Image (cartoon, grey):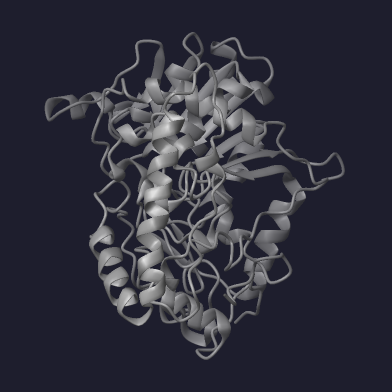
Amino acid sequence: MQETTLSVRRGAPSSEDDDGRDDSKTKKPSRLTMDVLSHLRRFSISAPCLAVAFPLFLVFIIAVAVLSRSRPRTEILVSPLDSLPLVPLLPGSALEGLAPNFGSLGVPLCRSKHGKMVVWTTKDLLKGLEEFVPVYETRPIKNNMYGMGFDHSFGLWFMARWLKPDLMIESGAFKGHSTWVLRQAMPETRIISLSPRHPEKYLRKGPAYVDANCTYFAGKDFVDFGSVDWGSVLKKHGIADPSRVLAFFDDHQNELKRVKQALKAGFHNLIFEDNYDTGTGDHYSLRQICDQTYITGGGHSCFKDSDEAKIRLKRKKFWKKAVDIDYLCGAGEAWWGVKGFMRDNFNHSNKQISYDEHVQNGRFIESVLDLYWELPPVAGPSLTHQTRYDPARSPDPIIEDGKFGLFQRLGLTRFETAVFNGYTQMVFLQVSVSPAS
Protein backbone atom coordinates (compact mmCIF):
# COMPACT_ATOMS: atom_id res chain seq x y z
CA MET A 1 0.00 0.00 0.00
CA GLN A 2 1.03 3.60 -0.49
CA GLU A 3 0.65 4.58 3.17
CA THR A 4 4.17 5.86 3.75
CA THR A 5 5.41 8.32 6.34
CA LEU A 6 4.05 11.79 5.62
CA SER A 7 5.53 15.10 6.63
CA VAL A 8 4.04 18.35 5.39
CA ARG A 9 3.09 22.00 5.94
CA ARG A 10 1.40 24.52 8.14
CA GLY A 11 -1.07 27.19 8.43
CA ALA A 12 -3.87 29.93 12.13
CA PRO A 13 -7.19 29.43 14.40
CA SER A 14 -10.60 28.08 15.77
CA SER A 15 -11.83 25.98 18.64
CA GLU A 16 -14.50 23.34 18.98
CA ASP A 17 -15.04 19.60 19.20
CA ASP A 18 -13.45 17.30 21.76
CA ASP A 19 -15.00 18.65 24.96
CA GLY A 20 -12.12 17.22 26.96
CA ARG A 21 -13.70 14.24 28.71
CA ASP A 22 -12.06 11.26 27.13
CA ASP A 23 -14.75 8.75 27.97
CA SER A 24 -13.49 6.09 25.56
CA LYS A 25 -10.25 5.32 27.40
CA THR A 26 -11.37 2.08 28.96
CA LYS A 27 -14.79 1.54 27.43
CA LYS A 28 -15.52 -1.72 25.73
CA PRO A 29 -14.74 -1.59 22.00
CA SER A 30 -17.16 -1.23 19.12
CA ARG A 31 -18.35 -4.16 17.02
CA LEU A 32 -15.01 -4.61 15.26
CA THR A 33 -15.24 -8.39 15.11
CA MET A 34 -18.61 -8.22 13.38
CA ASP A 35 -17.26 -5.62 10.97
CA VAL A 36 -14.30 -7.82 10.11
CA LEU A 37 -16.57 -10.80 9.48
CA SER A 38 -18.73 -8.63 7.29
CA HIS A 39 -15.68 -7.49 5.32
CA LEU A 40 -14.50 -11.05 4.98
CA ARG A 41 -17.85 -12.12 3.54
CA ARG A 42 -17.81 -9.34 0.97
CA PHE A 43 -14.16 -10.01 0.22
CA SER A 44 -14.81 -13.71 -0.35
CA ILE A 45 -17.33 -12.95 -3.05
CA SER A 46 -14.84 -10.89 -5.07
CA ALA A 47 -11.87 -13.17 -4.39
CA PRO A 48 -13.04 -16.82 -4.22
CA CYS A 49 -9.54 -18.23 -4.48
CA LEU A 50 -8.32 -16.35 -1.42
CA ALA A 51 -11.54 -17.20 0.40
CA VAL A 52 -10.67 -20.87 0.01
CA ALA A 53 -7.04 -20.37 1.00
CA PHE A 54 -7.79 -18.33 4.11
CA PRO A 55 -9.56 -21.13 6.06
CA LEU A 56 -6.67 -23.47 5.22
CA PHE A 57 -4.27 -20.89 6.60
CA LEU A 58 -6.30 -20.68 9.83
CA VAL A 59 -6.22 -24.48 10.18
CA PHE A 60 -2.43 -24.37 9.86
CA ILE A 61 -2.20 -21.67 12.57
CA ILE A 62 -4.38 -23.70 14.97
CA ALA A 63 -2.26 -26.81 14.39
CA VAL A 64 0.96 -24.93 15.15
CA ALA A 65 -0.63 -23.43 18.28
CA VAL A 66 -1.66 -26.86 19.60
CA LEU A 67 1.81 -28.28 19.01
CA SER A 68 3.47 -25.31 20.72
CA ARG A 69 1.58 -25.95 24.00
CA SER A 70 3.89 -28.88 24.81
CA ARG A 71 6.92 -26.59 25.17
CA PRO A 72 8.41 -25.96 28.60
CA ARG A 73 7.46 -22.51 30.02
CA THR A 74 10.53 -21.60 32.03
CA GLU A 75 11.06 -18.46 29.91
CA ILE A 76 9.47 -16.45 27.14
CA LEU A 77 10.08 -18.28 23.90
CA VAL A 78 9.27 -17.35 20.34
CA SER A 79 7.37 -20.16 18.64
CA PRO A 80 6.99 -20.74 14.89
CA LEU A 81 3.57 -19.16 15.27
CA ASP A 82 5.12 -15.93 16.49
CA SER A 83 7.22 -15.69 13.34
CA LEU A 84 4.38 -16.19 10.87
CA PRO A 85 3.63 -13.13 8.74
CA LEU A 86 0.19 -11.58 8.69
CA VAL A 87 -2.09 -12.32 5.75
CA PRO A 88 -1.31 -9.49 3.31
CA LEU A 89 -4.18 -7.11 2.61
CA LEU A 90 -4.56 -6.40 -1.07
CA PRO A 91 -4.94 -2.78 -2.23
CA GLY A 92 -8.57 -1.98 -2.86
CA SER A 93 -9.88 -4.86 -0.76
CA ALA A 94 -12.49 -4.34 1.93
CA LEU A 95 -9.92 -5.19 4.61
CA GLU A 96 -7.29 -2.69 3.55
CA GLY A 97 -8.36 -0.03 6.08
CA LEU A 98 -7.84 -2.46 8.95
CA ALA A 99 -4.11 -2.78 8.31
CA PRO A 100 -2.29 -1.35 11.37
CA ASN A 101 0.62 0.22 9.41
CA PHE A 102 2.26 1.55 12.57
CA GLY A 103 3.75 4.99 12.00
CA SER A 104 2.58 5.33 8.38
CA LEU A 105 1.13 8.79 9.09
CA GLY A 106 4.24 9.88 10.97
CA VAL A 107 5.38 9.69 14.60
CA PRO A 108 6.71 13.19 15.47
CA LEU A 109 9.10 12.32 18.30
CA CYS A 110 10.63 15.28 20.15
CA ARG A 111 14.30 15.94 19.44
CA SER A 112 16.62 15.88 22.43
CA LYS A 113 19.74 18.01 22.82
CA HIS A 114 22.24 15.20 22.31
CA GLY A 115 20.16 12.33 20.91
CA LYS A 116 20.21 10.38 24.19
CA MET A 117 18.24 7.12 24.17
CA VAL A 118 16.71 5.00 26.92
CA VAL A 119 18.89 2.13 28.10
CA TRP A 120 16.13 -0.50 28.26
CA THR A 121 15.38 -2.72 25.28
CA THR A 122 12.41 -4.59 23.85
CA LYS A 123 13.71 -7.67 25.63
CA ASP A 124 13.56 -5.76 28.93
CA LEU A 125 10.00 -4.66 28.17
CA LEU A 126 8.94 -8.24 27.41
CA LYS A 127 10.51 -9.46 30.64
CA GLY A 128 8.70 -6.67 32.45
CA LEU A 129 5.38 -7.68 30.91
CA GLU A 130 5.88 -11.23 32.13
CA GLU A 131 6.31 -9.90 35.68
CA PHE A 132 3.59 -7.25 35.51
CA VAL A 133 0.65 -9.36 34.27
CA PRO A 134 0.13 -11.17 37.60
CA VAL A 135 0.59 -7.85 39.44
CA TYR A 136 -2.10 -6.17 37.32
CA GLU A 137 -4.50 -9.03 38.02
CA THR A 138 -4.48 -8.03 41.71
CA ARG A 139 -5.43 -4.38 41.07
CA PRO A 140 -8.10 -3.13 43.48
CA ILE A 141 -9.92 -1.06 40.83
CA LYS A 142 -10.93 -3.53 38.13
CA ASN A 143 -12.99 -1.09 36.08
CA ASN A 144 -10.89 2.07 35.90
CA MET A 145 -13.20 4.00 33.56
CA TYR A 146 -11.69 7.40 32.59
CA GLY A 147 -8.37 6.28 34.07
CA MET A 148 -5.31 4.31 32.97
CA GLY A 149 -5.71 1.00 31.20
CA PHE A 150 -3.19 -1.83 30.91
CA ASP A 151 -0.67 -0.20 28.53
CA HIS A 152 -0.01 2.88 30.64
CA SER A 153 -0.23 1.01 33.93
CA PHE A 154 2.55 -1.24 32.69
CA GLY A 155 4.57 1.72 31.41
CA LEU A 156 4.40 3.58 34.73
CA TRP A 157 5.25 0.45 36.73
CA PHE A 158 8.13 -0.48 34.43
CA MET A 159 9.74 2.97 34.40
CA ALA A 160 9.37 3.52 38.15
CA ARG A 161 11.00 0.13 38.80
CA TRP A 162 13.80 0.86 36.37
CA LEU A 163 14.55 4.40 37.59
CA LYS A 164 14.30 3.56 41.33
CA PRO A 165 13.64 7.16 42.44
CA ASP A 166 14.07 8.35 46.03
CA LEU A 167 10.65 10.04 45.92
CA MET A 168 7.66 9.76 43.58
CA ILE A 169 5.23 12.60 42.90
CA GLU A 170 1.93 12.20 41.11
CA SER A 171 -0.18 15.12 39.96
CA GLY A 172 -3.70 13.77 39.44
CA ALA A 173 -4.73 10.67 41.39
CA PHE A 174 -8.41 10.13 40.53
CA LYS A 175 -9.45 6.92 42.38
CA GLY A 176 -5.87 6.03 43.27
CA HIS A 177 -5.02 3.47 40.57
CA SER A 178 -1.76 5.21 39.58
CA THR A 179 -0.82 5.47 43.28
CA TRP A 180 -1.33 1.72 43.54
CA VAL A 181 0.81 1.12 40.43
CA LEU A 182 3.64 3.24 41.85
CA ARG A 183 3.40 1.36 45.13
CA GLN A 184 3.69 -2.03 43.37
CA ALA A 185 6.79 -0.77 41.57
CA MET A 186 8.48 0.69 44.65
CA PRO A 187 7.06 -0.80 47.87
CA GLU A 188 9.12 1.32 50.29
CA THR A 189 9.47 4.65 48.45
CA ARG A 190 7.52 7.68 49.64
CA ILE A 191 4.80 9.07 47.38
CA ILE A 192 3.41 12.60 47.26
CA SER A 193 -0.02 12.81 45.63
CA LEU A 194 -1.66 16.03 44.45
CA SER A 195 -5.33 15.81 43.47
CA PRO A 196 -8.29 18.21 43.73
CA ARG A 197 -10.44 15.40 45.10
CA HIS A 198 -9.07 12.92 47.64
CA PRO A 199 -9.22 9.29 46.43
CA GLU A 200 -10.90 8.29 49.68
CA LYS A 201 -14.03 10.12 48.52
CA TYR A 202 -14.51 7.48 45.82
CA LEU A 203 -14.58 4.70 48.41
CA ARG A 204 -18.17 5.65 49.20
CA LYS A 205 -19.30 4.58 45.74
CA GLY A 206 -16.95 1.72 44.88
CA PRO A 207 -13.33 0.54 44.74
CA ALA A 208 -10.55 3.07 45.28
CA TYR A 209 -7.02 3.04 46.71
CA VAL A 210 -5.53 5.14 49.51
CA ASP A 211 -1.86 4.56 50.31
CA ALA A 212 -0.63 4.52 53.90
CA ASN A 213 2.87 5.73 52.98
CA CYS A 214 1.70 8.66 50.85
CA THR A 215 1.53 12.37 51.62
CA TYR A 216 -1.69 13.73 50.13
CA PHE A 217 -2.20 17.31 49.00
CA ALA A 218 -5.80 16.55 48.13
CA GLY A 219 -9.35 17.66 48.83
CA LYS A 220 -9.37 20.66 51.17
CA ASP A 221 -5.55 20.41 51.37
CA PHE A 222 -5.05 20.45 47.60
CA VAL A 223 -2.19 22.51 46.20
CA ASP A 224 -1.46 22.64 42.46
CA PHE A 225 1.92 21.25 41.37
CA GLY A 226 3.08 24.69 40.22
CA SER A 227 2.23 26.30 43.58
CA VAL A 228 4.01 23.83 45.87
CA ASP A 229 7.13 25.01 47.71
CA TRP A 230 9.12 22.02 46.51
CA GLY A 231 12.32 23.05 48.27
CA SER A 232 10.56 22.86 51.62
CA VAL A 233 8.65 19.65 50.79
CA LEU A 234 11.79 17.83 49.60
CA LYS A 235 13.71 18.90 52.68
CA LYS A 236 10.91 17.58 54.89
CA HIS A 237 11.14 14.22 53.09
CA GLY A 238 14.94 14.10 53.34
CA ILE A 239 15.55 14.53 49.60
CA ALA A 240 18.74 16.47 48.88
CA ASP A 241 18.90 15.84 45.13
CA PRO A 242 15.72 16.75 43.16
CA SER A 243 17.07 14.86 40.13
CA ARG A 244 16.38 11.67 42.12
CA VAL A 245 12.64 12.46 42.07
CA LEU A 246 10.17 10.98 39.57
CA ALA A 247 7.25 13.29 38.73
CA PHE A 248 4.20 11.69 37.10
CA PHE A 249 1.49 13.85 35.53
CA ASP A 250 -2.04 12.67 34.84
CA ASP A 251 -3.69 16.03 35.52
CA HIS A 252 -4.71 17.15 32.00
CA GLN A 253 -2.79 20.42 32.22
CA ASN A 254 -0.76 22.18 29.53
CA GLU A 255 2.42 20.08 29.41
CA LEU A 256 4.57 23.02 28.32
CA LYS A 257 3.55 24.72 31.58
CA ARG A 258 4.29 21.59 33.61
CA VAL A 259 7.75 21.16 32.06
CA LYS A 260 8.66 24.74 33.00
CA GLN A 261 7.38 24.21 36.55
CA ALA A 262 9.34 20.96 36.88
CA LEU A 263 12.52 22.66 35.67
CA LYS A 264 12.05 25.42 38.26
CA ALA A 265 11.80 22.77 40.99
CA GLY A 266 14.95 21.03 39.70
CA PHE A 267 13.15 17.82 38.68
CA HIS A 268 14.79 15.80 35.94
CA ASN A 269 12.61 12.70 35.36
CA LEU A 270 9.06 13.31 34.13
CA ILE A 271 6.28 11.03 32.87
CA PHE A 272 3.14 12.36 31.17
CA GLU A 273 0.24 9.92 30.98
CA ASP A 274 -1.93 11.60 28.33
CA ASN A 275 0.42 12.65 25.55
CA TYR A 276 -2.38 13.40 23.09
CA ASP A 277 -1.81 13.50 19.36
CA THR A 278 -2.30 16.67 17.33
CA GLY A 279 -5.96 17.60 16.92
CA THR A 280 -7.11 15.58 19.96
CA GLY A 281 -7.25 15.79 23.74
CA ASP A 282 -8.01 18.40 26.36
CA HIS A 283 -4.55 19.91 26.85
CA TYR A 284 -1.43 20.98 24.93
CA SER A 285 0.82 17.90 24.97
CA LEU A 286 4.46 17.11 24.26
CA ARG A 287 3.36 15.18 21.17
CA GLN A 288 1.53 18.28 19.90
CA ILE A 289 4.42 20.61 20.75
CA CYS A 290 6.89 18.44 18.86
CA ASP A 291 4.63 18.02 15.82
CA GLN A 292 6.65 20.43 13.68
CA THR A 293 7.21 20.61 9.93
CA TYR A 294 10.99 20.36 10.42
CA ILE A 295 10.72 17.07 12.36
CA THR A 296 10.45 13.73 10.55
CA GLY A 297 6.84 12.62 10.76
CA GLY A 298 5.68 16.08 11.77
CA GLY A 299 3.62 18.80 10.10
CA HIS A 300 0.35 18.39 8.24
CA SER A 301 -1.40 19.33 5.01
CA CYS A 302 -4.90 20.79 5.12
CA PHE A 303 -5.31 20.24 1.37
CA LYS A 304 -8.33 17.96 1.05
CA ASP A 305 -7.00 16.13 -2.00
CA SER A 306 -3.61 15.37 -0.44
CA ASP A 307 -2.42 11.82 0.19
CA GLU A 308 -2.61 12.49 3.92
CA ALA A 309 -6.25 13.59 3.67
CA LYS A 310 -7.22 10.49 1.71
CA ILE A 311 -5.46 8.12 4.10
CA ARG A 312 -6.91 9.84 7.18
CA LEU A 313 -10.44 9.67 5.77
CA LYS A 314 -10.07 5.95 5.13
CA ARG A 315 -8.64 5.15 8.55
CA LYS A 316 -11.26 7.17 10.43
CA LYS A 317 -13.78 4.49 9.48
CA PHE A 318 -11.92 1.92 11.59
CA TRP A 319 -10.24 3.76 14.49
CA LYS A 320 -12.33 5.72 17.00
CA LYS A 321 -9.71 8.39 17.68
CA ALA A 322 -8.46 8.75 14.11
CA VAL A 323 -8.73 12.35 12.91
CA ASP A 324 -9.59 13.41 9.36
CA ILE A 325 -8.50 16.68 7.74
CA ASP A 326 -11.79 18.46 8.48
CA TYR A 327 -11.33 17.71 12.18
CA LEU A 328 -7.57 18.38 12.19
CA CYS A 329 -7.58 21.78 10.49
CA GLY A 330 -9.16 24.99 11.75
CA ALA A 331 -9.59 28.43 10.22
CA GLY A 332 -6.64 29.55 8.12
CA GLU A 333 -5.44 25.93 7.87
CA ALA A 334 -4.32 25.93 11.51
CA TRP A 335 -3.48 22.32 12.41
CA TRP A 336 -1.11 22.75 15.41
CA GLY A 337 -2.32 21.99 18.92
CA VAL A 338 -6.06 21.55 18.37
CA LYS A 339 -7.01 23.65 15.34
CA GLY A 340 -4.50 26.31 16.33
CA PHE A 341 -5.44 26.39 20.02
CA MET A 342 -3.31 25.54 23.06
CA ARG A 343 -5.73 23.74 25.37
CA ASP A 344 -5.32 23.62 29.14
CA ASN A 345 -7.05 22.47 32.33
CA PHE A 346 -9.33 19.74 30.97
CA ASN A 347 -10.15 22.00 27.98
CA HIS A 348 -11.62 24.63 30.32
CA SER A 349 -8.96 27.11 29.24
CA ASN A 350 -7.91 27.68 25.64
CA LYS A 351 -5.49 30.09 24.03
CA GLN A 352 -5.18 30.65 20.32
CA ILE A 353 -1.53 30.59 19.24
CA SER A 354 0.12 31.46 15.97
CA TYR A 355 2.22 29.03 13.99
CA ASP A 356 5.35 31.01 14.98
CA GLU A 357 4.44 30.66 18.68
CA HIS A 358 3.97 26.93 18.15
CA VAL A 359 7.44 26.70 16.58
CA GLN A 360 8.94 28.68 19.48
CA ASN A 361 7.35 26.24 21.94
CA GLY A 362 8.92 23.37 20.04
CA ARG A 363 12.34 25.05 20.07
CA PHE A 364 12.10 25.62 23.83
CA ILE A 365 11.33 21.96 24.54
CA GLU A 366 14.28 20.93 22.36
CA SER A 367 16.55 23.28 24.33
CA VAL A 368 15.78 21.57 27.67
CA LEU A 369 15.17 18.01 26.51
CA ASP A 370 17.82 15.42 27.36
CA LEU A 371 15.70 12.37 26.49
CA TYR A 372 12.27 11.65 25.01
CA TRP A 373 10.70 8.18 24.84
CA GLU A 374 7.13 7.26 23.99
CA LEU A 375 5.86 4.03 25.50
CA PRO A 376 4.92 1.70 22.61
CA PRO A 377 1.52 -0.02 22.66
CA VAL A 378 1.78 -3.36 24.47
CA ALA A 379 0.55 -5.28 21.41
CA GLY A 380 -0.89 -4.81 17.94
CA PRO A 381 -4.66 -4.43 17.45
CA SER A 382 -5.11 -7.88 15.93
CA LEU A 383 -4.11 -9.20 19.39
CA THR A 384 -5.71 -6.67 21.73
CA HIS A 385 -8.72 -5.96 19.47
CA GLN A 386 -8.53 -2.31 20.50
CA THR A 387 -10.47 0.03 18.20
CA ARG A 388 -9.56 3.38 19.72
CA TYR A 389 -6.18 4.80 18.66
CA ASP A 390 -4.94 4.77 15.07
CA PRO A 391 -1.69 2.76 14.82
CA ALA A 392 -0.68 4.93 11.86
CA ARG A 393 0.32 7.62 14.40
CA SER A 394 1.94 5.27 16.94
CA PRO A 395 5.35 3.61 17.34
CA ASP A 396 5.64 -0.13 16.71
CA PRO A 397 4.11 -2.25 19.50
CA ILE A 398 6.13 -4.33 21.94
CA ILE A 399 4.36 -7.48 20.70
CA GLU A 400 3.77 -7.26 16.97
CA ASP A 401 0.59 -8.31 15.22
CA GLY A 402 0.67 -12.00 14.36
CA LYS A 403 2.55 -13.08 17.50
CA PHE A 404 -0.43 -14.55 19.27
CA GLY A 405 1.63 -17.32 20.87
CA LEU A 406 3.76 -14.77 22.74
CA PHE A 407 0.71 -12.67 23.62
CA GLN A 408 -1.01 -15.73 25.07
CA ARG A 409 2.03 -17.03 26.97
CA LEU A 410 2.45 -13.70 28.71
CA GLY A 411 -1.10 -14.07 30.03
CA LEU A 412 -2.52 -11.09 28.14
CA THR A 413 -5.44 -13.08 26.75
CA ARG A 414 -6.87 -13.22 30.28
CA PHE A 415 -7.84 -9.54 30.18
CA GLU A 416 -10.90 -7.92 28.65
CA THR A 417 -10.36 -5.94 25.47
CA ALA A 418 -11.45 -2.76 27.26
CA VAL A 419 -8.20 -2.54 29.27
CA PHE A 420 -6.22 -2.08 26.04
CA ASN A 421 -8.30 0.89 24.86
CA GLY A 422 -6.52 3.55 26.93
CA TYR A 423 -3.31 4.14 24.96
CA THR A 424 -2.42 7.82 24.44
CA GLN A 425 1.35 7.79 23.82
CA MET A 426 2.51 7.94 27.48
CA VAL A 427 5.90 9.66 27.42
CA PHE A 428 9.01 9.66 29.60
CA LEU A 429 11.38 12.60 29.36
CA GLN A 430 14.46 13.87 31.10
CA VAL A 431 14.94 17.63 31.17
CA SER A 432 17.62 20.05 32.33
CA VAL A 433 18.57 23.67 31.81
CA SER A 434 21.89 24.16 30.03
CA PRO A 435 24.53 26.07 32.04
CA ALA A 436 24.50 28.85 29.45
CA SER A 437 20.71 29.32 29.78
Residue pictured at 65% horizontal, 66% vertical: 297
Residue 207 picture location, percent across and down: 20, 26
Q: Which residue is drawn at 54% across and 35% down?
A: 79
Q: Which residue is drawn at 61% across and 65% down?
A: 106
Does residue 151 appear in the picture of this structure? no
Quick check: 106 left or right of 385? right
Residue 329, percent from left and from top: 48, 79
Q: Nearer the viewer, residue 152 or 350?
A: 152
Q: Is residue 58 above or below residue 433?
A: below
Nearest to the observer: residue 211 or residue 25 = 25
Looking at the picture, tell me which residue is in the foreground, 96 or 387. Answer: 96
Rendering coords of residue 25 (x, y %) = 33, 49
Q: In which quarter of the image is residue 172?
A: top left
Residue 375 picture quarter: top right
Please identify the quadrant where the N terminus is shown.
bottom right
Residue 26 x %, y %: 29, 46
Q: In the rendered view, tell whether residue 214 sits above or below residue 342.
A: above
